Image (tube, rainbow, N blue to C red):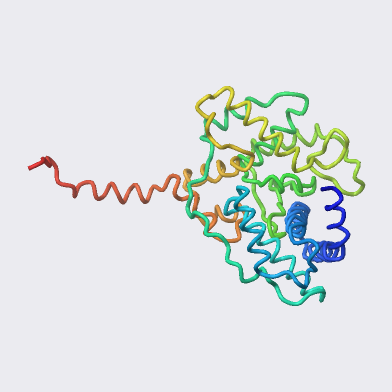
Amino acid sequence: MRKKQHEVTDSYGIEIELFSIWMKNKGMTRSTHQAYISDVSDFLQTVYPTETKQITKMDIMRYMAVCREKGAGDEARNRKLSSLRSFFKAMNEMEHLEGNPASLIAKSKQEKNRIPVYLEENELEALLHTIKGKYYIRNVAIVLLMAYAGLRVGEVHRMNVQDYRQDGSIHILGKGRKWRVIPLPDALQSTLNDALEDRKESRQGKEQPFFVSQFGRRLSIRMIQTVADDTIKQLKETMPALADKRLSSHKLRHSFATMQIRSGTDIRTLQELLGHASIETTQIYTHIDNKQLRHAMNNISSKIPLNLHKS
């Protein structure tokens, strides 16, 4: 297997390098860059030693079918297809290939308006109380930013010291390299101030990441996920009712959105806070606690005849 992987890398080295250059010029984030390279490399291994100019739509459809057989869901399949579409688009723009065999393959239809998994307010409070240890302040700040400011893991990872402003807001670089401004509540500001005082000095030159590892480097996405996931795991141990609930670091962001909707935040404002490109993405949260729907059904209750009996 190692030999084959080495041969694949050698055979498609130019294409992988061109794709990498194209993504960097597009300003894609490091995590997106790595995910796309991984998906494309996985696909190329299945068609090796076919030259890229000879790859067909059928090759890609066959790969997608195999992914499904291995247990990949619709979301994973669509991500892989997006990676391949971008790869061939890059080859076109870099004048290495003509045509895009992935462009006409339809994405899988995903379940819409699925109610997201989230934690209730009392569960979030209990979650924070489970955090302990040497990096207590840093880890509390990380969890708070996800659960009470709605940040993605990657956004916490990319956050720099200068992104936290004197007016108490944070400027966040989100998906699509779009910036958004989030005014923070006083309690969260206080925790970030404590985290800054407790922060280790960065050893990355001019770059000043907000969250720094014990080695003075920017805290990795994997480590940020671990901080959140380990905290959730400890919460489940203290609250057995959550044992079967599919919770993860990203569910903290869902919890933030849920609290906003229940507090009466309008959908457009929530879209801005979450950094969603499409309001359709934000609308999944309106199904959690939609007061208008409940009010509409209460209105009809007086119309239902009473004392109905079987004849």
Image quarter of the C terminus: top left
Q: Quadrant of residue 55?
A: bottom right
Instruction: Give 291 or 191, whichever is nearer the viewer.
Output: 291
Residue shown at 49% from the left, 52% from the top: 284
Is 192 located above or below residue 80 in the figure?
A: above
Instruction: Give the vertical position of 302 relative to 63 (above or below).
Output: above
Q: Is residue 201 above or below residue 173?
A: above
Quarter residue 191 falls in: top right
- The residue nearer to you, when weighing 106 against 200, is 106
Q: Position of residue 131 (x, y in %)?
A: 67, 27
Task: Name the side, left or right, on which 219 lies relative to 273.
Answer: right
Left or right of residue 259: residue 31: right
Q: Is residue 226 left or right of residue 299?
A: right
| Horizontal side, residue 35 vs residue 283: left or right | right
Residue at the (68%, 56%) spot, across then down:
175
Of all residues, the one furthest to the left in this rendering is: 311
Picture coordinates of residue 257, whole percent (x, y)? 54, 46
Camera-side residue of 59 and 124: 59
On the image, the x and y values in percent for residue 20 come to: 82, 61
What is the total number of numbered labels drawn onto the structure image? 0
Q: Provide residue 157's location: percent of width, then percent of height.
A: 75, 45
Taking the spot 90% from the left edge, 49% from the top edge, the residue there is 206
- Where, by quadrant of the figure, is residue 59 drawn? bottom right
Q: Is residue 169 above or below residue 17?
A: above
